[in-house]
Amino acid sequence: MPAVRCVAVDIGAGSGRLVLGSFRGDRLEVDEVHRFENRPRFEQGHLRWDAPRLLDEIRAGLVEACRMAEGPPDSVGVDTWGVDFALLDPGGDLLGLPVSYRDDRTEGMMEAFLQRVPASEVYEKTGIQFQRINTLYQLCAMARQEPGLLARASRLLMMPDYFHYGLCGAMCTELTDASTTQMIDLRTGDWDPGLLEAIPVRRSILLDPAPAGTPLGRLEGLPGLEGTLVVAPATHDTASAVAAVPVPEDEEWAFISTGSWCLMGVELPEPVTTQEARLGNFTNEAGVGGTIRFLRNLTGLWLMQGLRDSLPGRPSHGELEQMAEIADPFGCLLDTSNPLFFSPRSMTKAIDQFCKRTGQEAPSTPGAYARCALESIALSFARTLDQLGKLGPKRVRRVHMVGGGCRSALLCGMASSAMGVPVTSGPVEATAVGNLLVQAMALGLVPDLASARRLVYSSFDMDHYEPRSDLPWAEARERYDELCSIRESGL
């Protein structure tokens, strides 16, 4: 029986790639067929994504996938990061390049909005954590700064939905990504009218959210690929990654999807919108099959990416990890959620500034910088796991790490030791794999999410880590908690 082939388009805030998945019985084989850079650029007063170029890269990758598979793939689906969006005019054309969440237009917008609508009300409705990058506050900025542009908009599409539209001409808003906007009532699965009115934004520019796995139409404009079905997978990259976590159904587990951001949480049947969850800044995002991803958004490998860009010689990730491994442990620690690290011109200078503010000696070597970043990321996992235990309805006995951070054995080992629980890492390509699995569910190849996860387990190798006691992680955790308390207390 010939393999069924699907293409996952996975675009992050630094790069994009197309992955060809071949389903052969109880095995999934994946091959990367195309990779491209994705960096925002400053244009017309804002930091923007070059969406038309990204669409061209997707098309080029699909042609390459067709060549590699010796025929058109059966389906294709796109996932991206959350919160960002494109506005279209009545003719279906872009109203300017989409603005990046790292643009400074949202500064002060969240605080201004919460003066009109109490935070407790917003959280009770949406269950989404409060971040200035959320779509809600981006639209508040537009309503205040560019009301004419917002008035001309005929349709708002989240980034993956825009790319699907460009591929097949069909418009759709998929729920997992829409839930990151902080404008969806998670109990109804629809846009909340009170929040839209408070922005204000017209309901008419928004489509009814559709579930992951919705078929959209056939590819257009690519000769030889007209029969390929476009499917909206779990279009938020974290939702796709969590769908690929290879867990037994009865295991008590948490996940960490590792990348520029690290998303750590548990999968639940219902949202948790208690006062304690809101004050802990936990979020409830829609997942595959009606699930909820109860998680916290943590600064992740963005720290390492920033170090690469600001250290002399621009060392590779592998070189940085080797230097970190031999550096002295716990020289200094970073509150990874501190605004200093959000978008600094120089990550090394931001770390130096943080150390000066907190009375710590700044790192003196590239390895020391990298070590303090990795240790601090691991300690942020431990702090979040403790809070999940207090807020979530299930106990966690194992943590599954997926995504790019799985390549770092040092980080995975640190994470296990800091949290005090076993860690299983893999697959590295979890986001693309989860994207492919939802497409397979739409095609009828896989019946449900549990079956999809069993397929992952039989198809990919995993690494396992146990907590080690050769370093004083408990003492480091106390230091880390003190640093976080300074920010959380507002001092």
Image: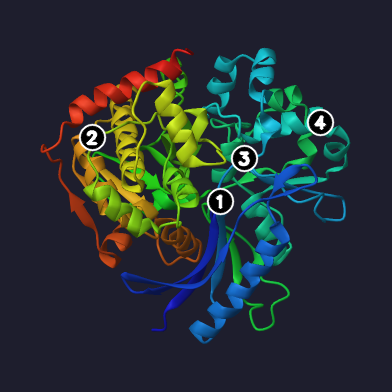
> CA gap, disc 4 to disc 2?
44 Å
Work out whether residue 16 or residue 230 is closer to the camera in this orientation and state it.
Answer: 16
Report if the CB atoms under discs 3 and 1 are less than 8 Å apart: yes
Dot 1 crowding, Cα within 10 Å, few <14, some 14–19, many 20+: some
Work out whether residue 364 or residue 228 is closer to the camera in this orientation and state it.
Answer: 364
> Which disc number belongs to residue 102?
3
> CA gap, disc 1 to disc 4?
25 Å
Dot 3 crowding, Cα within 10 Å, few <14, some 14–19, many 20+: some
Residue at (24%, 59%) from the top-left corner? 462
> CA gap, disc 2 to disc 1?
28 Å
Label 1: which secondary element = loop
Q: Position of residue 134 (x, y in %)?
A: 61, 34
Circle 1 is placed at which residue position? Answer: 13
Circle 4 is placed at which residue position? Answer: 145
Dot 4 crowding, Cα within 10 Å, few <14, some 14–19, many 20+: few
Q: Position of residue 333 (x, y in %)?
A: 33, 31
Report if the CB atoms under discs 2 and 1 are less than 8 Å apart: no
> CA gap, disc 4 to disc 3?
17 Å
Q: Extreme left residue here?
A: 470
> Which disc number belongs to residue 419?
2
Label 3: which secondary element = loop
Which amino acid, mark 3? Arg
- Between circles 3 and 2, the one closer to the viewer is 3
Residue at (51%, 52%) from the top-left corner? 234
Q: Is residue 44 above or below residue 162?
A: above
Report if the CB atoms under discs 4 and 2 are less than 8 Å apart: no
